[in-house]
Image (cartoon, grey):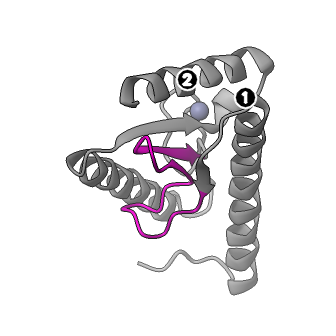
Amino acid sequence: MPDNLKPEDRIKTMRAVKAKNTGLERTVASMLAGMGLPGWRKHVRTLPGNPDIVFENHRLALFVDGCFWHGCTVCNRPLPKTNPEYWTRKIENNVRRAAKAKEELEQAGWVVLRIWEHELKDSASKSAVRFRIRQALKEVS
Ligand SMILES: [Zn+2]
C-alpha cells in the first residue's frame, strides 16, 4: 500500500527521523562518557537489530528508540492525519523487528536494554537511565 506522501515529503520525513535518532544516540553516548564507562561502541552492524550502543565485553546491547517510531505506550504519540494506516503499519513493523532482535540477542546470551526518547527529556529520568545502565552492567559482569 502506497503512503500517498509526495516524494519530497517522504524524503523530508525520513531525514527528520534520521536526524532525530542521531540526536538521541548522541545524548546517550555523552551520558555514557559522563559516567566514565569504558568499552562501548556505537552502531554495531554485525548484531541482530543493529544495536545503537554495545558493551561488547559485558554482552550488553542498548537500543535508543524514538517514542513515535516504536509505538511508545507511555507517550502514545498521535499518528499523522494523512494516511494513518501507513504509519500504523510502519510502527508495527518497527515494534516487531525490535522484539525479534531482542529475542535473537538474548538467545545468543546478550542482555538488551531499551532506552526511550521520553527517558532522555529531563535530568531526573536521565539519572534513572544511568541507574538502569549501571545495574545492567553489574548483572552481566
Ligand atoms: Zn515515550
* Residue that lies at the very extreme toward the top in this rendered image: 124
Q: Which residue is mark 2?
A: 134
Give the residue displayed 41% in from the left and 60% down from the top.
49
Please tell me which of labels 2 and 1 falls first in the chain.
1
Q: How many marks?
A: 2
**Where's residue 89, x and y in %?**
41, 60
Q: Are marks 2 and 1 in contact (CB under 8 Å)?
A: yes
Q: Which residue is mark 1?
A: 35
Q: Nearer the viewer, residue 113 or 117?
A: 113
Q: Nearer the viewer, residue 90 or 51?
A: 51
Q: Which residue type does callout 2 highlight?
A: Arg
**Where's residue 95, x and y in %?**
39, 50
Q: Is residue 130 above or below residue 116?
A: above
Q: Nearer the viewer, residue 71 or 59?
A: 59
Ligand 1 is in which quadrant of the figure?
A: top right
Q: Which residue type does callout 1 highlight?
A: Met
Q: Which residues are magenta?
A: 42-65
Q: Is mark 1 within 8 Å of ligand 1?
A: no
Magenta stretch: residue 64 in it? yes
**Where's residue 81, x and y in %?**
62, 54
Give the residue displayed 68% in from the left and 85% down from the top.
7
* Residue that lies at the very extreme toward the left in this rendered image: 107
Task: Tell me the CA gap for discs 2 and 1.
Answer: 9 Å
**Which quarter of the figure has residue 43?**
bottom right
